[in-house]
Image: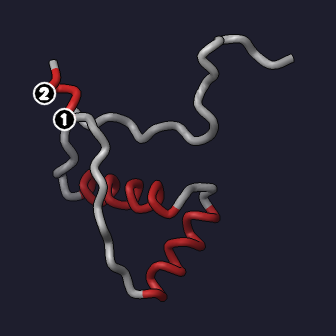
Amino acid sequence: MAEREHRHERKQVLLRLDPAVHDALQRWAGDEMRSVNAQVEVILREALRRAGRLPSDIRPIPRRGRPPSSSGSEPG
């Protein structure tokens, strides 16, 4: 079981970018209401899909916004 949990752990990647590329990426992410990190993941997944290299067991990108409360009650 631990091996399966480890496989779905989110990985960290250090990415060095030209400042102009980062600025463009930051503007694009803002237009899509995403973080730069989330935008990079969306772009990479789309590139993998187009190349026919997207793994079939890939998990969906986590939803945006605040996670649901543990109490399960809606604010009113």
Horizontal and vertical percent for residue 29?
A: 56, 64
Please identify the residue farthest to the right as the structure is shown.
Answer: 76
Camera-nearest residue between 9 and 51: 9
Disc 1 target residue: 7
Expressed as whole percent of the image width and height from the top left, the position of residue 4 reads 17, 26
State the residue in front, 19 or 61. 19
Which residue position is annotated with label 2? 3
Q: Secondary structure at mark 1?
A: helix
The correct choice, above or below, for 32 with respect to 74 in the image is below
In the rendered image, the residue lying farthest to the left is 3
Q: CA distance from mark 2 to mark 1?
A: 6 Å
Image-based side of 59 in relation to 1, left or right: right
From the viewer's perspective, tell me whether residue 55 is left or right of residue 47.
Answer: left
- Image: 73 above or below 45: above
Position of the N terminus by quadrant: top left
Mark number displayed over residue 22: none
Instruction: Please give the name of the residue rendered at 57% of the width and 41% of the height, measured from the top-left corner.
Output: 64
Q: Is residue 42 above or below residue 26?
A: above
Near mark 1 (Cα within 10 A), the count class, few <14, some 14-19 or many ≥20, is few
What amino acid does circle 2 point to? Answer: Glu
Residue at 64% x, 64% y: name it. 31
Helix, strand or loop at label 2? It is: helix
The three-letter code of the residue at mark 1 reads: Arg
In the image, what residue occupies the spot 65% across and 12% down?
71
Which quarter of the rendering shows the C terminus? top right
Whether pointer 2 and pointer 1 mark residues with C-beta atoms closer than 8 Å, the reply is yes
